[in-house]
Image (cartoon, rainbow, N blue to C red):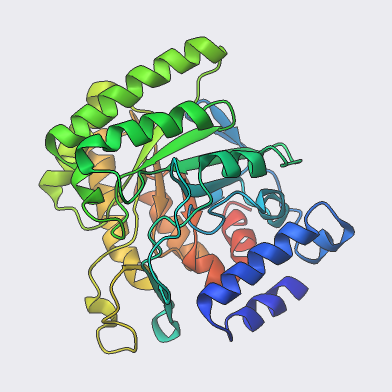
Amino acid sequence: MLSNIAQKMLLKIGPETAHDLMILGLKKTCNTPLANLYRQNLSSKPLSVMGLKFPNRVGLAAGLDKNGEAIDAFYDMGFGHVEIGTVTPRAQPGNPKPRIFRIPEKKAIINRMGFNNQGIERVLCNLSKKKTEGIVGINIGKNRNTPLEKSTEDYLLCLDQVYPFASYVTVNISSPNTPELRSLQFGSFLSELLSKLKERQDELANRYDRYVPLVIKIAPDLNISEVKSISEAVLEINLDGIIATNTTVDHSPVVDFKHSKEEGGLSGAPLFESSIKVISALYKLLGNKIPIIGVGGIMTAEDAEKIFSSGAKLIQIYSGFIYHGPNLIKRINSLDD
């Protein structure tokens, strides 16, 4: 497939340049005959999760299409859902470059992007141009310069804006690249944030006569006690789902390789064991009461099968897509054939 050749070529240039070229190329070619270069006609394997009907279990994780510019192209590749963002109320440039680093020997990536995005209004304008019907999640966060004690205001503003456009909304409280953001996973910060968001979700559902599920995305660097506390908070307010996990700040699996000392979140193959540990712990605590979307280090169909066996209803990929291209979607979707 020509798209796999392009993917291999992109791996030979700088990671952020490669990312920008990929998004630009997909944006220009989607909904044109050139989309046949990467289109995959996968067998439909529909399932219902959070009241939504997904065409298959494989989604694109947030962070790749931050501004919702190439959603139709990712649908063409066979993704059953696409999560865009993280989106913040106001546009922000993110952290200084360079801020993303490949470790190809370990099929890993370190990034410290810092929620770079065009801002909520521009992203929703991009989203309105989407032509393909499909499930789109919108991942929301706070601006870097918003004080932690006022972060709930940013999330509520984002929820208000994205609600009419989203199939579901993800509350990102686990990126390691926005100072203090992970504090929102704990104690009164978490309970206040979730209760306010759930209250607003109910108001918006009444206003638009449409219920949009609300999920949170958590870190892989949590101990069992912390996972339990988050599970209890999620059950208490009856949240619709959990995405586990984000990137890890533990770089020990790549310590002997170039870029290992760069600050940022580690993703890719070395993240898999940490991610599956959190997913397994969540499932033991939640069972089937709250659906889990598994993400982190899924590089093969066998990895995906282990995530499903640990309790995830859906999965998302990012680094696996970078290193293996669209064919990984096809291989995972073929698990039940």
Expressed as whole percent of the image width and height from the top left, the position of residue 175 reads 32, 55
Give the side of residue 238 with respect to residue 68, left or right.
left
Figure quadrant of the N terminus? bottom right
Q: Which residue is drawn at 48% across and 15% down?
A: 205
Residue 308, relative to residue 149: is it above or below? below
Q: How many marks?
A: 0
**Residue 213 visible here:** no
Q: Which residue is drawn at 10% across and 45% down?
A: 225
The answer to which of 79 and 12 lies nearer the viewer is 12
Give the side of residue 94 with respect to residue 167, left or right.
left
**Residue 334 visible here:** yes
Q: Quadrant of residue 45?
A: top right
Expressed as whole percent of the image width and height from the top left, the position of residue 232 reads 19, 31
The answer to which of 290 and 69 lies nearer the viewer is 69
Q: In which quarter of the image is residue 199?
A: top left
Give the side of residue 3 with respect to residue 102, left or right.
right
The answer to which of 206 and 227 lies nearer the viewer is 206
Expressed as whole percent of the image width and height from the top left, the position of residue 12 reads 58, 86
Q: Which residue lies furthest to the right in this view?
A: 33
Expressed as whole percent of the image width and height from the top left, the position of residue 238 reads 31, 23
